[in-house]
Image (tube, rainbow, N blue to C red):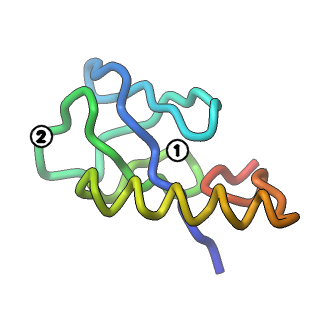
C-alpha cells in the first residue's frame, strides 16, 4: 500500500509543476489531471512523478500535520509520499 503526502505547488510550468513536501522539491507531471493547477494548490503524486489528484488546502494541511506527528513519534518520513 502506498500513502501519498500532499505536496504544495510552488511553480506551474508547461505540463509540469514544481512541488514541495517536507522540504523536498520535486518536478511532477500534470498529465493525469483534468483540472487547472495553480501555485499554492496541493497535489497527491504517485510513484513515477505523476500528480493524480488536487486536494483542498484544509484537508492537505490536516494530513501533513498528522504525518508530521507520526514522524515525530518515531516514524520515517522517507516513506511518506515520495517513492524512490
Q: Residue at x 36, y 49 (%)?
A: 43
| Res 54 → quadrant | bottom left
Residue 48: image location, x then y, percent = 57, 49
Determine which residue is flagged by label 1: 49
Work out whether residue 10 or residue 32 is closer to the camera in this orientation and state it: 10
How many C-alpha atoms fall within 10 Å of the one at disc 1: few (<14), some, or many (≥20)? Answer: some
Choose the circle earlier in sequence order: 2 or 1: 2
Residue in view at x 58 percent, y 70 percent: 3
Numbered disc in front, either 2 or 1: 2
Q: CA distance from mark 2 to mark 1?
A: 18 Å
Q: Secondary structure at mark 2?
A: loop
Give how far across and how far down residue 8 sits, in percent: 40, 37
Q: Position of residue 12 (x, y in %)?
A: 28, 22
Which residue does the numbered mark 2 point to in the structure image? 36
31 relative position to 10: left or right:
left
**Residue at 55% over, 40% down:** 21
Amino acid at each position: 500500500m502506498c500513502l501519498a503526502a500532499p505536496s504544495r505547488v510552488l511553480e506551474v510550468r508547461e505540463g509540469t509543476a514544481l512541488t514541495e513536501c517536507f522540504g523536498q522539491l520535486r518536478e511532477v507531471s500534470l498529465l493525469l489531471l483534468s483540472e487547472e493547477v495553480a501555485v499554492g494548490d496541493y497535489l497527491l503524486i504517485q510513484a513515477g512523478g505523476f500528480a493524480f489528484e488536487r486536494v483542498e488546502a484544509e484537508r492537505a494541511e490536516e494530513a501533513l500535520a498528522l504525518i508530521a506527528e507520526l514522524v515525530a513519534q518515531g516514524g520515517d518520513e522517507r516513506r511518506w509520499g515520495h517513492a524512490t
